[in-house]
C-alpha cells in the first residue's frame, strides 16, 4: 500500500512539473499582462481633447440679424431651438416627414430639420414667433383660433407656417387643392377639417 502511495505522489510531482498542452509560455503571458495597466495609461488619440470645427453663419431671423458660430452639422431646426431659443418651431420626426418644423426661408416654406444652418449665410428665416406684426395676429393665426384648428397643438406652428405660405404660393381654390398643398403637415390628433376651414377663411380674408 505504501509503494502505491509513493508511486502516486511521484506521478503527481511529474504532472505538476510538466507544462500542460497549450500552456507553453504561460509565465511570459502573465508577466506581459502585468504591464497592461501602464500601456492603457499612455495617451491615445481618443483621450486627447476633442477638436470641434465651427463655421460662421450670419442669419436674419424674424427681422433680427444673428452672427453665429455653429457645428457644420447643425440643422436650421436645432439652430433655432438651441442657439436662438425660438422653441415655437417643433421637432417632430426630425426626418422631414411630419412638417412640425416648417419655417419660411426667403419667403418659401421649408422643413427646418432638413436644412443645414451652415448653408444659409445671408438668408432670411421667418418662424411662427415672427408671423404676427405690431401685436396683430397674422390672418392665418387668427383663423386657426376662430376655427379651433388644433387639439394638442404640437403640429400647429408648422401647420400655420405652411398655411401662411399658401397665401402667396400658387394653389387652387378647391378643398382638394388645399389638402394637397397642406399634405406635408401631419396632425396626429386628426383636426384636418378645422385646419381646412381655417385655411379657407384666411384665404378669403386676403382675397
Image (tube, rainbow, N blue to C red):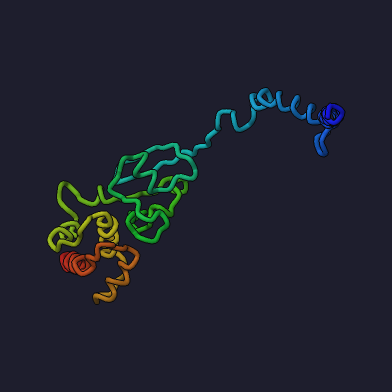
Q: Residue at x 17, y 47 (%)?
A: 134
Residue 2 seen in the figure: yes
The answer to which image quadrant residue 2 occupies is top right
| Horizontal side, residue 128 vs residue 78: left or right | left
Camera-nearest residue between 17 and 122: 17
Q: Residue at x 34, y 43 (%)?
A: 81
Relative vertical location of residue 180 with respect to residue 66 in this rendering, above or below: below
Q: Quadrant of residue 199?
A: bottom left
Residue lying farthest to the left in this orientation? 146
Q: Residue at x 46, y 38 (%)?
A: 56
**Relative horizontal placement of residue 145, taking residue 111 as reference (left or right):** left
Foreground residue among 74 and 63: 74
Residue sticking out furthest to the front:
1
Q: Is residue 200 left or right of 51 when viewed as pictured?
A: left
Quadrant the N terminus occupies? top right
Q: Residue 207, percent across and down?
A: 18, 68
* Location of residue 163 in the rendering, given as x and y in whole percent from the top left corner: 26, 62
**Which residue is more in the foreground, 56 or 156?**
156
| Whether residue 207 can be seen here | no
Q: Is residue 2 above or below residue 140?
A: above
Q: Residue at x 33, y 40 (%)?
A: 84
Q: Position of residue 27 (x, y in %)?
A: 79, 27
Locate residue 33, reporting x and y percent. 71, 27
Picture mark count: 0
Amino acid at each position: 500500500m505504501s509503494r502505491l502511495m509513493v508511486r502516486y505522489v511521484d506521478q503527481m510531482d511529474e504532472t505538476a512539473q510538466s507544462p500542460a498542452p497549450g500552456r507553453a509560455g504561460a509565465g511570459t503571458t502573465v508577466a506581459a499582462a502585468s504591464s497592461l495597466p501602464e500601456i492603457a495609461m499612455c495617451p491615445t488619440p481618443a483621450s486627447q481633447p476633442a477638436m470641434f470645427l465651427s463655421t460662421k453663419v450670419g442669419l436674419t431671423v424674424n427681422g433680427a440679424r444673428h452672427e453665429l458660430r455653429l457645428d457644420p452639422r447643425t440643422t436650421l431646426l436645432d439652430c433655432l431651438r438651441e442657439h436662438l431659443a425660438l422653441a415655437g418651431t417643433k421637432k417632430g420626426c426630425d426626418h422631414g416627414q411630419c412638417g412640425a418644423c416648417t419655417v419660411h426661408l426667403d419667403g418659401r416654406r421649408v422643413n427646418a430639420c432638413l436644412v443645414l444652418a451652415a448653408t444659409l449665410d445671408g438668408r432670411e428665416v421667418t418662424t411662427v414667433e415672427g408671423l404676427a406684426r405690431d401685436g396683430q395676429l397674422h390672418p392665418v393665426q387668427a383663423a386657426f383660433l376662430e376655427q379651433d384648428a388644433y387639439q394638442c397643438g404640437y403640429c400647429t406652428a408648422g401647420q400655420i407656417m405652411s398655411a401662411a405660405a399658401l397665401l402667396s404660393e400658387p394653389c387652387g381654390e378647391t378643398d382638394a387643392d388645399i389638402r394637397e398643398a397642406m399634405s406635408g403637415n401631419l396632425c396626429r390628433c386628426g383636426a384636418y377639417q378645422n385646419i381646412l376651414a381655417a385655411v379657407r377663411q384666411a384665404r378669403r380674408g386676403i382675397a
